[in-house]
Structure formats: C-alpha cells, structure tokens
Image (cartoon, coloured by chain):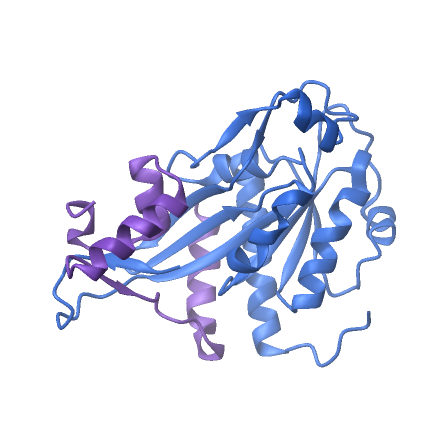
Chain colours: A blue, B purple
Amino acid sequence: MPFASSEPTGERESVPVAIKILIAGGFGVGKTTLVGSVSEVRPLRTEEALSEPSSEFDDLDGLERKSTTTVAMDFGRITISDDLVVYLFGTPGQKRFWFMWDELAFGALGAVVMADTRRLADSFPSIDYFERNGMPFVVAVNCFDDARRYPLLTTRSALNLTPDVPLLLCDARKRESSRDVLVALVEHAADRLTAPRVTSSR
Amino acid sequence: MLQLCQRPISVADLAATLDLPLGVIRILVADLRERGFVSVKPPAPIGLSDLRILKEVADALRKL
C-alpha cells in the first residue's frame, strides 16, 4: 500500500517494508475478531447495524445473534521493527463487495481464509479466488463454542483442499491462536518462495 | 494530515488514525500531492530474495 510523506521528494526518508496479509472468508466467520485480537491498533471498523434489506441479502442462518457487519474493511497493524510492518486487511464478507478484492489483494504476501464448520461452503469462493490468483493462503477453522468439532482431515476433504494448503484450527478471540495462524501463513509463503509450485492441480 | 505525514505513513494508517474512510483519505492525499504538500511512494517491494524478511516476520510474530 502506498505511503504518504511531507518530506521533500529528494530526501531519502526510508519507507518501511510493508507486509500485507488478507483475512478472508464468509460472512460472519470471525475476520474482524481475528484482526482485533492481534492488531496493535483498534481495528478500523466500519461496521453497520444489519438492516432489514441487508438481512435479505445476507444469509444469517446460524448467526442469529449477529447484529453488525463489516461493510468496508478491517485494518490492523503489527509493527515488527522501525522498518518492517505487517498490515492486516479483512476483506468484506458479503458477495456484493467482491469488486474490492482485486485491489485489496494487490501486492499481498498471502491470505488467511477463515472457515466455520457449520457453513463451510461460505469459504469456497475465497479459496477459489486465492487458488486462481496463485497467492499463498492457509485455511483457519474458527472454533465457535457451539459448533461441532470435526477432524481436520474431514474438513480438508470437505473443503477440497490440495495437500499443500495448511489447514489449522483457531480461536479468533485469542491472541496466541490468531498469531499462530499468521505464523503458519508467513511460513507457508516462505516455503513457496523456496519451492514454488509448478502447476496447480485444480 | 500534514502533521501525520511528517514521517512516512501508510494511507491505511492515515485512514485509521483520522477515522475516515480509505476512499476519502485517498482523495485528500491526491489533492495534497497535486499541490506539492506530500509525496507518495510505493512500499519497498518484497521479492524472491526476501526470504530473510519473511523469517524475521515469522520469528517476531511468534513472540507476540
């Protein structure tokens, strides 16, 4: 993402290396929660109360208590050092905001696709998107308190994930758990750098 | 905005700090750039050679 500076253009003020990570997944899967649990800044939330017309478009099955949703994007930041910063961008969950994805994905290191075992199909579009675009991604199953737990292997096959895509369980409310998901993604991206995939099997 | 831009700051950070939508910030930054008040630079690119950076990021994240 671009940096703005009021320094004179000739001045070589160093611009930090920005690592951009996308947090994707279906509507109500916990993207905002994950960004909030690891970010050092209050997530830039643009949540709106779900209105009646929105309820028509947004499938609320299993999400009866959800009363707000992210209409634009979440933004989080983790400063590694003076010249290295990780930015997290939650992609909007609703289909009608997908036009924003290409712009959000530009220059990103990789993506976390979040999944809810009660609504696995909601993650398919995100998985398809990153597979097609060749961007490294991991899938994190957010363990909601009232959702049944399935073995990872079952979830992997239900999601039709290729063996090279890391799949892990997480609790997006917990900082350590969200952190582990990000570590898994960065390691996966590093693996892809050293051994790039030649062809996609799908 | 100019105060915040004393040191390089990402456009997303500007939006978060000022609590304004990203689209609004982009227009304001473009206006300020046109008048010569700010310069806009792309972030340092990450390439194949930056495995070291990814290792550094993974290590730092583990310590969170």
How many numbered discs? 0
For the point 61% across and 45% down, the residue is A97
Dividing the image into 4 quarters, which one contains the N terminus of chain A?
bottom left
| Location of residue A196 in the rendering, given as x and y in whole percent from the top left corner | 64, 78
Q: Residue at x 62, y 65 (%)?
A: A135
Q: Residue at x 21, y 61 (%)?
A: B34
Instruction: Look at the image and tell me in which quarter the C terminus of chain A lies.
Output: bottom right
Give the quarter of the image for residue A39: top left
Residue A65 picture location, percent across and down: 68, 18
Question: Which of A18 and A74 lies nearest the eye of the viewer?
Answer: A74
Quick check: can you spot residue A143?
yes
Left or right: residue A99 versus residue A43 is right
Q: State the image coordinates of residue B59 (x, y, percent, origin top left).
A: 45, 57
Q: Residue furthest top?
A: A65
From what the image shows, is residue A33 above or below residue A185? above
- Note whether residue A82 is visible: no
Residue in the picture at 82% in, 51% down: A159
Q: Quadrant of residue A86?
A: bottom left
Quick check: A50 left or right of A38? right
Towards the viewer: A142 or A58: A58
Q: Is A115 positioned to the left or the right of A4 in the image?
A: right
